[in-house]
Image (cartoon, rainbow, N blue to C red):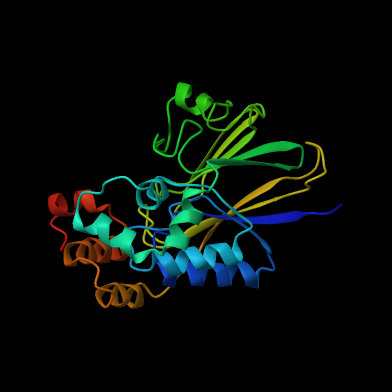
Amino acid sequence: MPVERIAVVSDVHGNLTAYEAVLADIAVRGIHRVINLGDVVGKGPRGSACTALTRERCESTVRGNWEAFLAGDGELSGDGLRWWRAELTAQDRAWLHALPGSLDLRLSGRRVRLVHASPIDEFTRVHREPDDETFAMMFEPTPFTGDAGRADVVAYGDIHDAFLSAQPGATLVNVGSVGNPLDEPTPSYVILEGDPDGDVQVPFGIQFVRVSYDAEAEIEAAAASGMPAREIQAYAIELRTGVYRGLHAQLGLR
């Protein structure tokens, strides 16, 4: 019985140090298929390098909200957003802008749907432990995902908070974040395991993986990059603590 293993990563956010560590871990495990759930860029200093690495190592990538912000032509407010866009090449932006919003695949008789934030769009956020209505919505087809049918498994990123929630016939997986984890400071990704040609009687697995990396080296890279000082400070605190920057002042984090 052939078993396929697929690594699913998300929310790299320009953190090349963490991305390289995670991709090295995936390679050591002998996994050759990698799918990226978006937000490759923004927040960290090396969005262009992470875009190049994504194009090299990931078989498919879906568009995140940061791709929509930075790769588009809309007006940006704030020095940080303008800096992150300027750090990308024209080729980076064209590739990121053209990414699909969702992707479906089959494993062990299950339709697995991969999106950045939700089947509504790249911006509709679904937090851990959603209510029953929101949970059910995550599996239904929408104009954004197309008319392929209801999903059995949905994997997404966006919230930087890895978890799994299951009901009969429906498994919701947040793969966490590679470059900006906000549940704990350690990068997270998921391995899906199953038979692309098998039915639901064939084993199917979901494994969460945490990979340590040198966060201080990434912070040093940010400091040397020319990224706005305010963004470097917020980025450094997030990488060290796993606490969202919107809570830093409230918690007295500096």
Q: Which of 69 and 72 is in front in this view?
A: 72
Q: Where is residue 171 in the image (x, y as percent from the top left)?
A: 59, 36
Q: Decide if residue 178 is in sight here.
A: no
Residue 6 lies in quadrant:
bottom right
Residue 151 lies in quadrant:
top right
Residue 106 lies in quadrant:
top right
Please give the name of the residue rendered at 13% of the width and 57% of the height, measured from the top-left corner: 252
Q: Position of residue 184 (x, y in %)?
A: 37, 57
Q: Nearer the viewer, residue 9 or 66?
A: 66
Q: Position of residue 253 (x, y in %)?
A: 16, 60
Q: Would residue 31 be found to the left or right of residue 131 on screen?
A: right
Please give the name of the residue rendered at 38% of the width and 48% of the height, measured from the top-left corner: 72
Residue that extends furthest to the right in the rendered view of this protein: 1
Quadrant placement of the C terminus? bottom left
Please give the name of the residue rendered at 51% of the width and 25% of the height, measured from the top-left corner: 137
Q: Which of 244 and 116 is in front in this view?
A: 116
Q: Decide if residue 231 is in sight here.
A: yes
